[in-house]
Amino acid sequence: MPVFGVVSQRAQGHVVTAILIAMFAMLCTAFSYGRMASAYPSAGSAFTYVGQELHPALGYVTGWGMLMDYLLNPLICTILCAQLARNLALGVPYSAWAIFFAVLFTSLNLFGIQASARINSTLAIGMGMVIAVFFVVTTRYVFKHSYAEPGFFSRPFYDPVVFQWKAVLGGTSLAVLTYIGFDGISTLSEEAKSPQRDILRATVLVCLITGILAALEVYAAQLVWPAGRAFPEVDTAFVHVAGLAGGAWLLQLVNITLLVATIGSGIGSQLGAARLLYAMGRSNAIPASFFGKIEPKHRIPRNNVMFSGLFALTGAFVLSYERGVDLLNFGALIAFVGVNVACLVHYFFRAKKRRGVNLLVPVVGSVVCALLWWNLNSRAKLLGAVWMLVGVSYGAFRTKGFRNELVNFGVPAETTQ
């Protein structure tokens, strides 16, 4: 729902198609993440998988790109929460809401993983009920109106008048944000009771369920609000779709639900960012004295939670929502390609018994993710390249021109603070 407006603009209305193409790529990548989590059940996710399987320097580069993804996720959640909250309290400025939500995410994560899990479980139940209400209301709205023109119900998938592959792939590169979060599951391998079994199952199911629900939601929205009709506000476009279908009460209900959903996303993504920073700090890719510490009472990397909160707060006053999504996906897609390649090497080229699925799935995942990365906004690729250049320069400085060891992937005992 949050990306409906920006994807509709970029893909010329083909939001459903963009969501489904993105699901295909993410299912392949989820398979690779799950398999690699079984091989390396540690907190580092793509950073660890690529570094251990391919080369420490490649792991560092992947981790640096992934770090941008993880730090930007709570940032765009802060931006969207502030914008949605303004719809409820018009007199309160954006800046006040941005500060409030950045502090809220940070405070909740400081209570540890169990508190975060309980909060998200409660939110999921309430949001599921609202989605059901939305489907009922939009179905009634659509069938109350007479749509005699041919192709009305298939146009959200394919409109021959405006369909262009470049536009659709550009929209798909944004639609990837719908699935961002499944990769965060792998950063919690050290908290999972049975990571070898549960991480693969969780990542694949999250992508599949998310894709099906997202496709149904945006399909209903496109039937209510056909492509080509301008949105009052692109970032909160889905809220206005709900208002058209059900009136002011549904507009406010969906607005509140999106706000609550984004709060849940912000909490989870900030925790994922903190765990990635911890893994990189523990491996000495970034200063271990700050990022490699665990707070003893709640067993969380407290310094990293606070750092990511400050990053989100600062960025909320610099970036727009759409620009943040573009940049986030720049880092995410780099990490996804890296994990697919690492999975291919580990489970096919280095395996004693080679299976076709271990060749086909990672190859397809790598190719599609690389294609989506290529279709990102050119400005996002430029800014992302700057971020990567900073990371490589920092790595060169730390290793005296890459002459010393860059990353230590041995897993030391946790250091408390």
Image: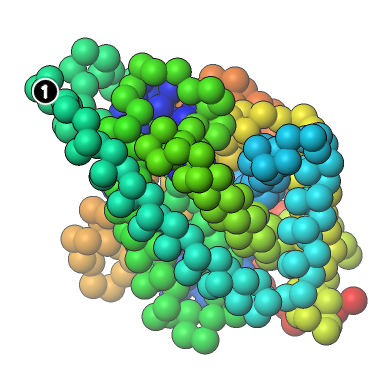
Residue 60 placed where, x, y %? 64, 51
Q: In the picture, residue 72 is in which quadrant?
A: top right
Indicate left or right for 130 with 322 as reference: left
Q: Check disc 1 and report the residue beneath it.
A: 148
Residue 376 placed where, x, y %? 48, 27
Nearer-the-camera pick, 128 or 210: 128
Nearer-the-camera pick, 387 or 19: 19
Nearer-the-camera pick, 230 or 41: 230
Residue drawn at point x = 74 percent, y = 58 percent: 105
Which element type, helix, strand or loop, lies under badge 1? loop
Indicate left or right for 76 with 96 as reference: left
- In this picture, is 400 found above or below 47? above
Residue 299 placed where, x, y %? 76, 80
Residue drawn at point x = 31 percent, y = 25 percent: 226
Residue drawn at point x = 83 percent, y = 46 percent: 99
Residue 327 in view in this figure: no
